[in-house]
Image (cartoon, rainbow, N blue to C red):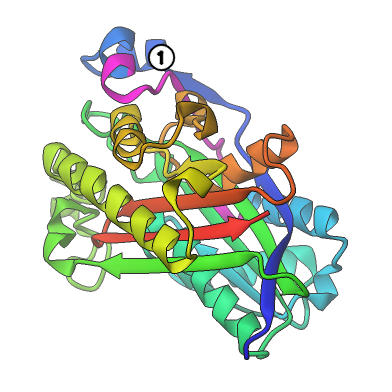
């Protein structure tokens, strides 16, 4: 019989700089009205020079630790979900470990694009349930502004920067009720960054072709997202032995308002139970869900005993969900 797991603390951090739709009107051929109607995004946060992914991940981690009452020296493992690490190596998780003084912690990065935080939650939960570790820090952190093509109006309007973190620990009560993960590598080319890896190392030619930036087949990703949000949500609810009516709070990946509205409609969840902040931050990939969770907790919107469903999807293609009792 495995050990129970709970979230002991949450924290988040976003850049001070705001990039509005009006600002983007001056950069590419777009409009505030067009962006808002099609995505629900009005502004996003952009990191300043000298603010890498680890900068925001560290702040989010420190806030989560402060709330948890657990000291950095007590953390056994640090997992950072990101597609925008500070560098290929060392891992951003190792940089965070150094920054917060978690001297006893193992540390690694995990790449599952926008589903990175959910995948990280799954790994951390397994370590704790199997008594391998007691305290695990899971972070979703991105500086997507560093890989966005500000000449491509279809993608540059979508993404923003930030980080969110949780501290998971052993508990007497079972808080993590269900987890569902999935992937479909056949759809990998629908959302990718073509250049910069071993397959296509950075060259003068692919920089000229702007292949080192994010590329996305918008319509195909939209269709995938609408379907998979519904499927993975249902699986989490079924695994937990609950029904849709038992969901008290829903935190979806903050990618597009139309995707969220479609998922909410299919799941028959009351809109009042859904947390949305993409109007302020845009799509922060792996950071979207933990930042939303951090804000919701900070605002007192999640009450003790609430069943909270968190669902994400992203490049890979990947998807995943987790259902927790707060």
Vertical placement of residue 302 versus 88, above or below: above
Task: Give me the residue at 60% from left, 35% from top.
Answer: 15
Please provide the residue range marked out in magenta.
36-54
Quadrant location of the C terminus in the rendered image: bottom right
Give the residue drawn at x 60%, y 83%: 127
44 to the left or right of 256: right
Q: How many marks?
A: 1
Image location (x, y in percent) of residue 157: 32, 27
Q: Is residue 287 visible?
A: no
Residue identified by numbered label 1: 23
Q: Which of 259/104 is in front?
A: 259
- Using the image, determine if residue 213 lies above or below residue 98: above
Query: Which is more toward the observer, 173 or 127?
Result: 173
In the rendering, at what x and y percent does residue 36 appear?
A: 34, 16
Residue 48 is inside the magenta segment: yes
- Is residue 124 visible in this depiction of the protein? yes
On the image, the x and y values in percent for residue 324 come to 59, 59
């Amino acid at each position: 019989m495995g050990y129970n797991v709970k979230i002991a603390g949450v924290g988040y951090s976003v850049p001070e700089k705001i990039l509005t739709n009006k600002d983007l009107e001056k950069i590419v051929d777009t409009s505030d009205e067009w962006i808002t109607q099609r995505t629900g995004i009005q502004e996003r946060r952009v990191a300043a020079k000298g603010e890498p992914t680890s900068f925001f991940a560290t702040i989010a981690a420190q806030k989560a630790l402060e709330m948890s009452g657990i000291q950095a020296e007590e953390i056994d493992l640090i997992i950072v979900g990101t597609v925008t690490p500070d560098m290929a190596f060392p891992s951003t998780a190792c940089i965070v470990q150094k920054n917060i003084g978690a001297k006893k912690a193992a540390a690694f990065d995990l790449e599952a694009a926008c589903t990175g935080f959910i995948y990280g939650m799954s790994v951390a939960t397994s370590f704790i349930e199997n008594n391998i570790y007691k305290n695990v820090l899971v972070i979703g952190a991105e500086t997507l502004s560093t890989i966005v093509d500000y000449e491509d109006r279809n993608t540059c309007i979508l993404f923003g920067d930030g980080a969110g973190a949780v501290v998971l620990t052993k508990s007497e009560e079972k808080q993590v009720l269900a987890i569902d993960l999935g992937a479909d590598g056949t759809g990998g080319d629908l959302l990718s960054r073509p250049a910069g890896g071993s397959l296509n190392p950075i060259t003068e030619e692919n920089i000229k072709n702007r292949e080192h930036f994010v590329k996305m087949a918008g319509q195909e990703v939209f269709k995938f997202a609408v379907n998979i949000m519904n499927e993975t949500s249902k699986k989490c609810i079924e695994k937990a032995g609950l029904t849709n009516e038992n969901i008290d709070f829903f935190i979806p990946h903050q990618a597009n308002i139309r995707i969220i509205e479609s998922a909410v409609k299919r799941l028959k969840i009351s809109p009042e139970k859904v947390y949305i902040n993409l109007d302020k931050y845009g799509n922060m990939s792996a950071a979207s869900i933990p930042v939303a969770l951090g804000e919701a907790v900070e605002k007192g919107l999640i009450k003790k005993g609430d069943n909270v469903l968190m669902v994400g999807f992203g490049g890979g293609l990947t998807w995943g969900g987790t259902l927790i009792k707060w």
